[in-house]
Amino acid sequence: MNTKDFIVEKTLKLILKKGAIDISISEIRNCTGLTTGGIYYHFSDKSEIFEAIMQKYIVDYMKIDFDKIPLEGSSKERIHDGLLYILHHFTDGVEIESVNEKINYGTVLILLTSTGYADDEVIRTVSQTGNDIGIFLTDLVEDGKRQNEIRKDFSTENIAESLYIMYMGIQCFWLDFPNEDINLIFERNFEMTWQAIEYQ
């Protein structure tokens, strides 16, 4: 790992430990073991370190590679597995290489965005990710209708919207109750939603 990434990761860990972003360069120096000059060699100031943290752990992490989502089987299986993949993309944690552990992504999301450090790029990324999930679900619903596995008396847009709202509800529940069995919550809610949209 290069020194710049090391500073970013150690600073994030410090922010999470402290529960706040109001940290000093001396605190960053102590947690990294670098000199002040060593830190300023890579970053012009503290805000640039925070911007690098936001880029790596919010902007980059929120981006989903939909081509990597395994989609096989019936429409029910494809929608189920697709949504579960997206959910785990967020809930499985962010790898911090320098300390060889995973952290709760919910903690990162809440701490960094609730402190007002969510810049325009973060807001754009959140919006784009939501739009991409909507398109992904719309395509799966259309395919399910063609295969007579999803009911046709509801519009594709309404069904995709219902699936998206179900998913977002589970993600918000996880943020509020991180110790609950999120897989069990997902399975229960997905089954109820599927019963409502299954071809009759």
Image (cartoon, helix red, strand yellow):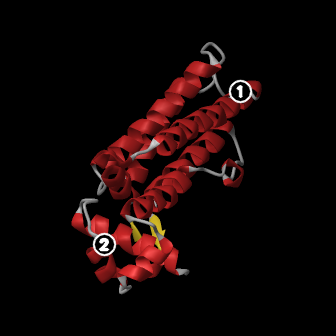
Relative image position of residue 34 (x, y in whole percent):
38, 85
Residue linked to disc 2: 25
Residue 187 locus on image (x, y percent): 46, 45
Q: Residue 175 location, x and y as percent? A: 33, 48
- Residue kind at label 2, given as amino acid type: Ile
| Marks 1 and 2 close (CB-CB < 8 Å) | no
Q: Is residue 19 above or below residue 73?
A: below
Q: Pointer 2: residues within 10 angstroms few (<14), some, or many (20+)?
A: some
At horizontal 40% and vertical 58% (from top left) the residue drawn is 105
Q: Is residue 113 left or right of residue 8?
A: left
Q: Residue at x 37, y 57 (%)?
A: 108
Kindly state the secondary structure of the residue where label 1 is placed: helix
Comparing 130 with 150, the one in front is 130
Tag 2's secondary structure? Answer: helix
Image quadrant assignment for residue 24 = bottom left
**How far is the residue under mark 1 from the one under mark 2?**
53 Å
Residue 142 marker: 1
Quadrant placement of the C terminus: top right
Visible in this render: residue 127? yes
Q: Is residue 139 left or right of residue 12?
A: right
Q: Nearer the viewer, residue 71 or 9?
A: 9
Give the mark count: 2
Q: Is residue 139 shown above or below 53?
A: above
**Residue drawn where x is 33% and y is 57% of the image:** 107
Q: Label for residue 11? A: none
Q: Is residue 200 visible?
A: no
Position of 143 with respect to 192 (left or right) is: right
* Residue extending furthest toward the top: 153
For the N terminus, the quadrant is bottom right
Question: Is tag 1's residue or tag 2's residue first in the polypeptide sequence?
Answer: 2
